[in-house]
């Protein structure tokens, strides 16, 4: 079986997706599209594919079985809807859509079309998270009491350029909390359970930008564990993710810039901790996980199964993110899941 792919949006994240298609024997990139015609033509040559600058034209190509949407956030919903209506399977970069209501419209469209809708959520494929999953689920940490996540890096340049979508509300919709929080909230939901309540705070340090570049969102999960998520897009540090899990019988610290990346602390006097066998790869851990997510999408189509990223969990994460933004507007109010349409 061959899966004919149409790639839409050939910007910064495209190379990591391209690596996934190169890895999968069943994937054939047959069409590419970018509003920048020169970029589209150059990349089409690399693949021996057709080049487009208008995604509607790409959707008319019968060899395109599935599309991969790597566009500004405000375009995820309209392009995914058009693709599903054209009878294509869809892989879309995070966030699946800018709001829960928009995500729900996509879920309904996928149901109607009978096509696969999938989220390119690389968190599910990060080596460190895969390594700790059996410990967390196997009860090795006892009762998880506190989960902290942090995502930080430097987007100051993109946020400072009003001609780019990243700092414009009409392009990105939400700032660091939506952009990076899509990862952290999915991670919380996937590994630790559903959300009970949420409260948030955001700040904007880049003056020309229209969205927050700093955020802290806290709350409680239905398991009773508390959580704290932190985001900064103005920190001068290689792009990093950190996860701390504190349990009644042990704790874990994951840090993509630390060597070892993962340490398991078994008790209060375990000063050394036990490293988990996860490669130290500060330059490539993210790209690797993105490529693996693409491989899973193509394999899911080939094997006629659902992709590993569960859209019901994605929906819960979107709902909690919606509450976080409402909390920002309400001065950090604690909002309970179920109290808002999202
Ligand atoms: N998984 C991750 O860790 C990760 C990292 C970075 C970006 N992303 C996601 O990837 C997506 C794209 O981000 P990016 O950083 O690659 O953005 P980008 O700005 O670098 O690339 C977007 C591309 O889309 C093209 N484009 C814009 N409007 C278009 C249109 N109407 N038709 C065709 N092409 C159009 C632009 O010319 C550009 O090449 C976003 O959803 C972002 O959140 C994910």
Image (tube, rainbow, N blue to C red):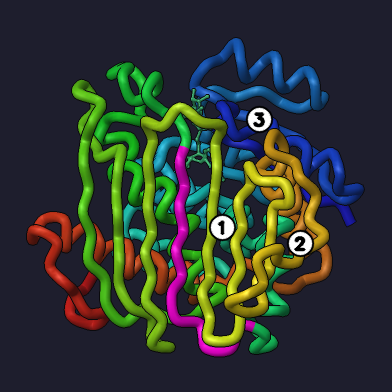
The percent coordinates of residue 216 (x first, y second) are: 30, 54
Query: Could you tell me which residue is drawn at 52 percent across and 88 percent down?
Result: 143
Q: Secondary structure at mark 2?
A: strand
Say whether disc 2 or disc 3 marks the residue closer to the N-terminus. Answer: 3
Residue of label 1:
119
Q: Quick one: which residue is furthest to the left in this view?
A: 330
**Residue assigned mark 3:** 32
Q: CA distance from mark 1 to mark 2?
A: 31 Å
> Looking at the image, which residue is at 21% across and 41% down?
203
Q: Dominant secondary structure of the magenta stretch?
A: strand
CA gap between label 3 and label 1 equals 19 Å
On the rendered image, what quadrant is the N terminus found in?
A: bottom right
Tag 1's secondary structure?
strand
From the top left corner, tell me how far across and down residue 174 is, in percent.
29, 45
Q: Is residue 5 magenta?
A: no
In the picture, residue 209 is in which quadrant?
A: top left
Q: In front: 224, or 61?
A: 224
- In percent of width and height, residue 40 lies at 62, 20
**Considering only order in the chain, which callout, 1 or 3, is on the residue closer to the N terminus?**
3
Report whether 64 appears left or right of 9.
right
Q: Is residue 213 above or below residue 245?
A: above
Mark 2: few, some, or many residues within 10 Å (few <14, many ≥20)? Answer: some
Magenta stretch in the rendered image:
141-152
View extreme (front): residue:
269
Counting every numbered tag in the picture gives: 3
- Point out the image quarter for the C terminus: bottom left
């Amino acid at each position: 079986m061959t899966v004919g792919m149409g790639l839409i949006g050939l910007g910064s994240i495209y190379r990591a997706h391209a690596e996934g298609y190169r890895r999968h024997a069943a994937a054939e990139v047959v069409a590419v599209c970018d509003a920048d015609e020169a970029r589209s033509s150059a990349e089409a040559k690399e693949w021996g594919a057709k080049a487009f600058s208008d995604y509607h034209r790409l959707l008319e190509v019968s060899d395109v079985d599935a599309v991969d949407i790597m566009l500004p956030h405000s375009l995820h919903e309209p392009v995914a809807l058009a693709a599903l209506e054209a009878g294509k399977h869809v892989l879309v970069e995070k966030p699946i859509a800018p709001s829960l209501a928009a995500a729900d419209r996509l879920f309904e469209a996928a149901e109607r079309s009978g096509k696969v809708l999938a989220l390119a959520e690389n968190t599910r494929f990060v080596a460190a998270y895969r390594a700790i999953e059996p410990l967390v689920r196997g009860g090795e940490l006892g009762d998880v009491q506190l989960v902290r996540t942090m995502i930080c890096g430097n987007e100051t340049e993109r946020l400072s350029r009003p001609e780019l979508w990243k700092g414009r509300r009409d392009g990105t919709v939400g700032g660091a909390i939506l952009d990076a929080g899509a990862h952290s909230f999915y991670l919380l939901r996937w590994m630790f359970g559903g959300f009970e309540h949420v409260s948030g705070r955001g700040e904007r340090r880049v003056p020309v930008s229209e969205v927050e570049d700093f955020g802290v969102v806290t709350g409680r999960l239905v398991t009773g564990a508390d959580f704290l998520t932190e985001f900064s897009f103005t920190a001068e540090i290689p792009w990093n993710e950190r996860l701390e899990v504190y349990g009644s019988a042990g704790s874990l610290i994951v840090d993509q810039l630390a060597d070892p990346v993962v340490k398991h602390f078994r008790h209060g006097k375990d000063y050394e901790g036990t490293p988990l066998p996860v490669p130290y790869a500060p330059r490539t851990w993210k790209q690797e996980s993105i490529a693996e997510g693409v491989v899973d999408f193509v394999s899911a189509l080939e094997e006629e199964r659902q992709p590993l990223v569960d859209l019901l969990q994605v929906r819960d994460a979107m709902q909690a993110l919606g509450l976080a933004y409402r909390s920002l507007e309400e001065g950090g109010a604690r909002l309970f899941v179920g109290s808002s349409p999202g």
